[in-house]
Image (cartoon, grey):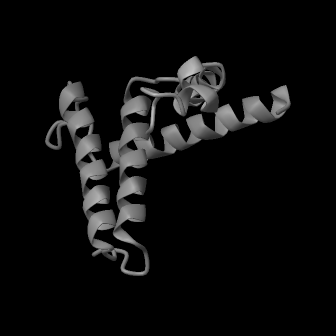
């Protein structure tokens, strides 16, 4: 992948981060609803909310359910979207370069010995 395309992809991910945070901010999830002052959000609570979306996705997958709010879509798909929105909101709140981190992690994983097929098929190798 060319450097321009890679930088563009990183920027697009970070633009999604900014959109998700902006929408959440406008809905009042980061401010005191009475005063408008920025809240000191609990990072652990926000991560737990991400986890809850993943758990809901698992339930939708286990039971092959349609989503309650978007019935034309599988529940797992919508809950995965919710998880991504919450992740992007979290990263936006603290201005994490999630786009750059994703690309760095993809590059790192390409060279990990425990991610190589020949090592995964060995006894004791990573199966999932």
Q: Of all residues shown, which one is farthest toward the front? A: 123
Residue drawn at (66%, 32%) of the image: 10
Q: Position of residue 30 (x, y in %)?
A: 27, 37
Q: Dividing the picture into quarters, in which one does residue 99 lie? A: top right
Q: In this orientation, which residue lies closer to the viewer: 84 or 40?
A: 84
* Quadrant location of the N terminus in the rendered image: top right
Q: Dividing the picture into quarters, in which one does residue 124 lie? A: top left
Q: Is residue 31 visible?
A: no
Q: Position of residue 95 (x, y in %)?
A: 46, 24
* Quadrant location of the C terminus in the rendered image: top left
Q: Of all residues shown, which one is farthest toward the left? A: 34
Q: Dividing the picture into quarters, in which one does residue 116 lie? A: top right
Q: In this orientation, which residue lies closer to the viewer: 76 or 124?
A: 124
Q: In this orientation, which residue lies closer to the viewer: 84 or 114?
A: 114
Residue drawn at (30%, 49%) of the image: 54
Residue drawn at (83%, 30%) of the image: 4
Q: Position of residue 34 (x, y in %)?
A: 14, 42
Give the side of residue 6 with respect to residue 105, left or right: right
> From what the image shows, is residue 41 above or below residue 30?
above
Residue drawn at (62%, 33%) of the image: 117
């Amino acid at each position: 992948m060319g450097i321009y395309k890679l930088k563009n992809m990183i920027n697009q991910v970070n633009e999604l981060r900014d959109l998700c945070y902006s929408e959440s901010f406008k809905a009042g999830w980061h401010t005191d609803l009475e005063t408008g002052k920025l809240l000191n959000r609990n990072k652990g609570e926000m991560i737990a909310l991400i986890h809850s979306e993943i758990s809901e996705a698992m339930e939708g997958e286990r039971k092959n359910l349609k989503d309650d709010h978007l019935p034309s879509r599988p529940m797992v798909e919508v809950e995965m979207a919710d998880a991504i929105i919450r992740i992007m909101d979290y990263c936006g709140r603290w201005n994490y370069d999630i786009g750059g981190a994703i690309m760095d992690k993809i590059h790192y994983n390409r060279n990990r010995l425990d991610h190589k097929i020949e090592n995964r098929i060995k006894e004791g190798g990573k199966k999932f």
